[in-house]
Amino acid sequence: MSTNRRTKIYWLCQGLGWGIYAAANLVLFILFVPGISLQWKRYALIFFCAAIFAILTTDRFRFFAKNRGWLYMSPARSFLRVIASSIVLGGIITAQVSFVWLLVFGVAPFRRLDWLPGVLFGWTSTVFIWTVAYFGIHYFEQYRQAEMEKLQLAVVAKESQLQGLVSQINPHFIFNSLNSLRALILENPARAQNVVTQLAALLRYSLQSGKSLTVPLEEELEIVNTYLQLEAIRFEERLAIKMEMAPETLSVPVPPMLLQSLVENGVKHGIEKLPQGGEVSVTSRIEHNTLKIDVRNTGNLAGGSNSTQIGLVNARERLRLLYGNEAALVLRNDGDNSVVAEITVPVRGSSPA
Amino acid sequence: MRALIIDDERLARSELRRLLKDFPEIEMLGEARNADEAFKIIQELQPDLIFLDIQMPGDNGFQLLERLDQAPMVIFTTAYDKYALKAFDVNALDYLVKPIEPKRLGAAIAKVVSRFSIANAAVSVDPKSVPAIETHHQVFVREGDHCWFVKLKEIVLLESEGNYTRLFFGPNKPLLLRSLNYLQTRLDSQLFFRANRKQIINLNFIESIHAWPNGGYLVKLRGGFEVTMSRRQAQQFQEATKL
């Protein structure tokens, strides 16, 4: 809420509140105090003045309390101050109103002051209600603000957590590719040029992957293909590739670099370890409104090295943050000489939460 | 120096081979694509120097070195994981990150060549060529995160531990994946003596010898080691060392 708007609302409340309070008092006087209905104009003047005094006095108090920082004290600390201020303010307003009374009705009522405690108590309790309301509103707003900040913080934390979980291209791969590239420049310049563009595409995609929560599977697949072509330069005949993607899966949004990291894992733990090499295959299909992607590589899950586990744990955590329990990632042996990573991602109309 | 390149990537091998053309002191023996190939070639051709990629299919570079009875001089080549080499004493080895900088390659070769000529000078004094591991040679030992290239003449004591053998040198005592009996057949008997069933000692490290009442010996080695010999072993010891 802007300060300007807050000020407007404040003055509106002040005017309406005290106006209604004064009017109601006037009506009660005229209805229930006998013999004053003829003088109602005098009473109206007094109550009008009383409303003005109350508005000005409480406004001064607001200024004072704000300056002293009372609004940011804990309720326990501000409560005694609220009570004391109410008594003082009640006294001030009573004095102001009494002065008008004196001007309107003369000194006669002041010969006997038996009305004074009642009036004093009336103003004090009214002002007390005012201050409690004023402080209450402030406390409520502060509380709401804090809640909102907490929420925003949670969102930011989730985002940065998600970004941290996005896997980056394996540096080992980048430097190996650069090394191959150095050899290719002499051996096959046209191919070397190709490799430079492919590496650039891969690096760009990897560096930008933190920026969007999801990308269409098609885009991710393009980068997986680029990556595999680059690996093919390193592994030559040792790496065989197979892709079988159902056409309806290509537009489904998926987290960037997730499939890529699993394919990289497949190459690293499958092909790279095998002197004879092997095959990496990616297949996708839609089943019961969920997207299923399988990444299969030659090899065996033998105990599993730590690096895979970290990558896998991160990928799972990322899926959980994005989709809750609707997504899954399973890594298992499939037969004697094949490892499969199965991704399950819900298909939604738009992008996920 | 006769050198061998070991790397699983054809392009990496040809790149290194091309870079090495500028160094006439390196005579290229060949290339190996993995640890098994490399093991055979090393056994057969006994290269003085190997350029060794750490990450390879099958056994990695470290595992290859562990399989060798004696390690040639090694220059590691690695794409990225310098950290894998942190465990080494920096002076003990050289590594190159890929793509290899010709200047760094030159510096590494110069270092290896100077060490090689010192070692060679030492060998040429020794006229006989025994099948045993020559004493200036080094073995590669790895334990946990730590790796060592240990010069045999620096080993004080070898102690049997089941099928393996613990080496004592300096403050270190890693386990070598060889039996003591096997090592005895490979070690230079001029320098190493089987003191008892469990221990082989380096004669150069003997500090003092004490006669024991049963006719045996108590041998004190530098570094605070004490080794006992039975009477029979003591006699052999006398013969071997001509005490």
Image (spheres, coloured by chain):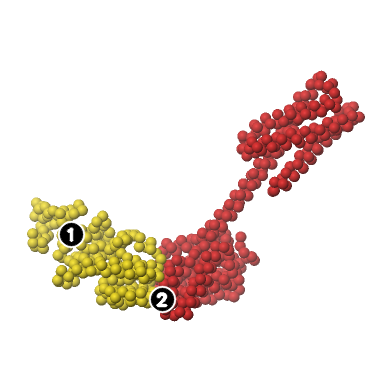
Chain colours: A red, B yellow
The residue furthest top is A111
Q: Secondary structure at mark 1?
A: strand
The residue furthest right is A38
Question: Does residue A24 lie above or below A149 as drawn?
Answer: above
Where is residue A99? Give x, y as percent: 80, 27
Where is residue A74? Give x, y as percent: 61, 38
Residue A191 seen in render: yes
Which quarter of the figure is the C terminus of chain A placed in? Answer: bottom right
Task: Respond whether the residues carrying marks 2 and 1 are from the same subunit.
Answer: no
Q: Residues within 10 Å of mark 1 (few under 14, many from 20)?
A: many
The residue that appears at 24% across and 59% down in the rendered structure is: B167
Q: Which mark is residue A154?
A: none
Q: Choose between A93 and A146: the one closer to the eye.
A: A93
**Chain under numbered label 1:** B
- Specify whether A249 is left or right of B60: right
The residue singled out by tag 1 in the image is B201
The residue that appears at 11% across and 55% down in the rendered structure is: B216
- Specify whether A101 is left or right of A74: right
The residue singled out by tag 2 in the image is A183
Q: Secondary structure at mark 2?
A: helix
Q: Choose between B206 and B211: the one closer to the eye.
A: B206
- The kind of residue tagged 1 is Ile
The residue that appears at 44% across and 71% down in the rendered structure is: A178
Label 2 and label 1: CA atoms lie apart by 50 Å
- The kind of residue tagged 2 is Ala
Where is residue B128? Give x, y as percent: 15, 71
**Chain under numbered label 2:** A
Labelled pair 2, 1 in contact (Cβ < 8 Å): no
Residue A102's image quarter?
A: top right
- Specify whether A132 is left or right of A233: right
